């Protein structure tokens, strides 16, 4: 008998029929003697619908109220799933984040989990119940409801698994694992049986939305065995088969994983590029540009400062497209005049494409194959950033799919690797 956390995403919870299937699957695990905590998302489309309602009233909704609204999708899900389990004769109890409580900071719409009290969950598990906890939401120290950012139910699930020291966290979704790239963009993408924690962290941070990055960070920090698998299989498939399916995130590098130099391709359309033009080239300038941006709680990604010509330089960086307008406002009001720059040039029609693989550490020439492949497709690279196990480029967003497909082929990811 083991304590296992299941997470079901929006598609998996997308209709009453699907919720009944989730209940069948959970009942199967329970019947095998396991203690089960389930963390579901809102039904598919629901979070978008709720945010849309808020935006009909206020273009940039007050963040506290937005979280009050957006968090309700998950509350409906937990209640429905509890009913579906009871209808199948399984004792279950649902909780909203604040009832557990799942404590977070007060950064509305992108709150971070600070702690999870396991007492209530454990008491129910000990009483033989399945416990269902809302994904995506928590409560701050003042009792305000917060949400964890889009895709945040993954993080709720792994954090609950860490708090309970669960044997495994199973992330059930609408694909049967982590692929070499998004199978919706490249049909030839292959499922990976295992992916290293570091690669998964890079892929998530570079835009693969199969897992929210903070869930991968939690998995790494607390060594939570985490597996991504399909919720769309027959819920009654044998448990042994299900336990081996999907993609396991591993914390140890083995030789087989080293065999693939590049393991995956990630991409993100949510990018925007901002250039501060003709910045006086002197100490402290990077700070005087990015300091106010950071103070406005805007995350900056790639940064490039050009060689200076005649004492001035151009300073470019990328931000999430959602924060593009806010970043430009900050620069226009607090930075341009203050540092004596000429102007701001902004472009939100860019995207980021990245190749990821721990094998890149020990292989030279990987980035150059990436650049060659893009040039053969006539794609201009606007910015480049590298780390030990990834290379990312910013390109015009209309070339995103083309770039991903070309790179997937160039790195041989559509071919089954030799074992
Ligand atoms: P859920 O609602 O279950 O959380 P998401 O839509 O958030 O599901 O994440 C699953 C989706 O992630 C898949 O349908 C797929 O289109 C996308 N995806 C992006 N990159 C990958 C990848 N490398 N492997 C698998 N799926 C990916
Ligand atoms: N329902 C939330 C969202 O759509 C959280 C999640 O699905 O993980 O972003
Ligand atoms: Mg998701």
Image (cartoon, rainbow, N blue to C red):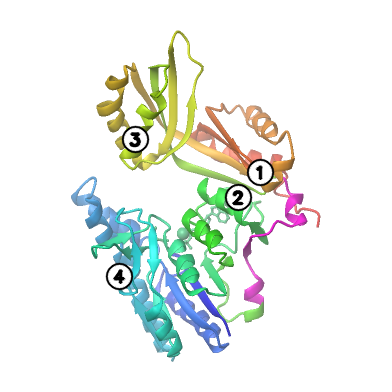
Q: Earlier in the sequence, mark 4 or mark 2?
A: 4
Report the side of 233 relative to 91 (left or right): right
| Residue receiving disc 1 | 408
Q: What is the span of residues highlighted in magenta in the rendered image?
A: 241-261
- Residue at which label 2 appears: 181
Q: Comparing marks 4 and 1, which lies closer to the viewer? A: 4
Q: Earlier in the sequence, mark 3 or mark 1?
A: 3
Mark 3 in CB contact with mark 1 (< 8 angstroms): no
Q: How many marks?
A: 4
In primary-sequence order, the first of circles 4 and 1 is 4
Q: Residue 293's mark?
A: 3
Q: Are marks 4 and 1 in contact (CB under 8 Å)?
A: no
Residue 56 at what x, y percent from top left? 22, 50
Which residue ends up furthest to the front in the rendered image? 283
Q: Nearer the viewer, residue 5 or 378?
A: 5
**Under 8 Å from ligand 1: the CB of mark 2?**
yes
Marker disc for residue 178: none
In x, y percent, where is residue 61?
23, 50
């Amino acid at each position: 008998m083991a304590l296992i956390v299941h997470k079901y995403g929006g598609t998996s919870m997308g209709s009453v029929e699907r919720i009944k299937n989730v209940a069948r699957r959970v009942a199967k695990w329970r019947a095998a003697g396991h203690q089960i905590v389930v963390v579901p998302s809102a039904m598919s489309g629901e979070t978008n619908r709720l945010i849309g309602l808020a935006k009909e009233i206020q273009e940039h909704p007050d963040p506290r109220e937005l979280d009050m609204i957006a968090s309700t999708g998950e509350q409906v899900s937990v209640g429905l799933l509890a009913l579906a389990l009871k209808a199948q004769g399984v004792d279950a109890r649902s909780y909203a984040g604040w009832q557990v409580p799942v404590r977070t900071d007060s950064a509305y719409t992108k709150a971070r989990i600070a702690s999870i009290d396991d007492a209530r969950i454990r008491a129910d598990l000990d009483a033989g119940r399945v416990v269902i906890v809302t994904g995506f939401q928590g409560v701050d120290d003042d009792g305000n409801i917060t949400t964890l950012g889009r895709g945040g139910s993954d993080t709720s699930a792994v954090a609950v698994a860490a708090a309970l020291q669960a044997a495994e966290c199973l992330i059930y979704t609408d694909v049967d694992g982590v692929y070499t790239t998004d199978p919706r963009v490249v049909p030839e993408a292959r499922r990976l049986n295992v992916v290293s924690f570091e690669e998964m962290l890079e892929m998530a941070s570079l835009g693969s939305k199969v897992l929210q990055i903070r869930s991968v960070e939690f998995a790494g920090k607390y060594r939570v065995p985490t597996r991504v698998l399909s919720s769309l299989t027959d819920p009654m498939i044998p448990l042994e088969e299900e336990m081996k399916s999907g993609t396991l995130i591993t914390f140890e590098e083995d030789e087989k994983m080293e065999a693939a130099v590049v393991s995956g391709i990630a991409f993100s359309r949510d990018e925007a590029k901002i250039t501060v033009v003709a910045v006086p080239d002197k100490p402290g300038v990077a700070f005087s540009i990015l300091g106010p941006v950071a103070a406005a709680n805007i995350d900056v990604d790639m940064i490039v400062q050009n060689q200076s010509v005649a004492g001035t330089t151009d300073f470019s960086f990328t931000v999430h497209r959602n924060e593009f307008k806010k970043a430009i406002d900050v620069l226009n009001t607090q930075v341009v005049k203050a540092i004596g720059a000429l102007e701001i040039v902004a472009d939100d029609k860019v995207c980021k494409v990245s190749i990821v693989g721990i094998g890149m550490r020990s292989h030279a020439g990987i980035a150059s194959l990436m650049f060659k492949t893009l040039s053969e497709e006539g794609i201009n690279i606007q910015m480049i950033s590298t780390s030990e196990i990834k290379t990312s480029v910013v390109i015009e967003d209309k070339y995103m799919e083309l770039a991903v497909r070309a790179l997937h082929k160039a790195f041989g990811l559509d071919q089954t690797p030799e074992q």
